[in-house]
Image: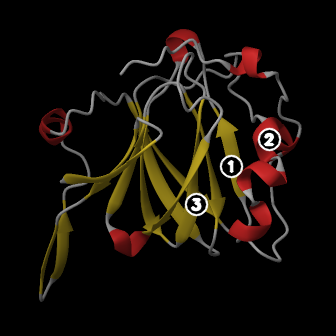
Amino acid sequence: MKIVSEYLNAVKVVALDRHSDDRGFFMEIYSQDEMDRLGIDFHPVQDNRAHSLKRGTVRGLHFQRGEYAQAKLIHCTAGSFYNLAADLRTGSPTFGQAVCIRLQAEDDLLVYIPKGFAHGVAVIEDNTEYTYKVDAPYNGDSRYSGGLSVFYDPEQLNWDELLPDTELILSDKDRSGLSPSPEETESEIHYEE
């Protein structure tokens, strides 16, 4: 494993090692020793799998505050999607900025998103699937565990450019997501250099 790029002073893209032969391939998706070697402080407590039937499906943006703040490690297993992360770390020079990283199964990449970021996906292909590990359990009562509609602003995430001529498919929860002020969205995670 190796880090191949970094965004917003925190979001890391990690390339996986694929070992192929005439039988197929083998790939290690997660190794605590490798995360430690790469300097990524991540200790998962839960592994999730998501499948989206249709192009244009949007999940998120989501984040949790306080003791329920989550770091995530995302891997595409079928199809492709845009992985979105918005910096909500207090005092961060990139506060409020978002990054969009395209993931597809054949790229053999992981994306690490630390605590203090809102996260979401926008599906590019029908029947897209991904897994993601988190380092804190989901808490539906966490004040900002729901979608943040402020990040659906077309000018901020350029939806027409990401998914041209595509009707977005959102859950009712995300469609009615909160539109808080920047002061309200601060994650209680402080930026550290």
What secondary structure is found at the residue carrying circle 3?
strand
Q: Amino acid at mark 1?
A: Arg
Q: Which mark is residue 59?
A: 1
Q: Residue at x 36, y 71 (%)?
A: 107
Q: Residue at x 73, y 69 (%)?
A: 161
Q: Percent position (x, y) of residue 172?
A: 86, 43
Q: Quadrant of the C terminus?
A: top left
Q: Amino acid at mark 3?
A: Tyr
Foreground label between 3 and 1: 3
- Is residue 184 placed above or below 111 in the rendered structure? above
**Mark 2 sits on what residue?**
174
Q: Residue at x 12, y 89 (%)?
A: 22
Q: Is residue 111 left or right of residue 117?
A: left
What secondary structure is found at the residue carrying circle 1?
strand
Q: Earlier in the sequence, mark 2 or mark 1?
A: 1
Q: Amino acid at mark 2?
A: Asp
Q: Earlier in the sequence, mark 2 or mark 3?
A: 3
Q: Is residue 107 left or right of residue 91?
A: left
Q: Which mark is residue 82?
A: 3
Q: Which mark is residue 37?
A: none
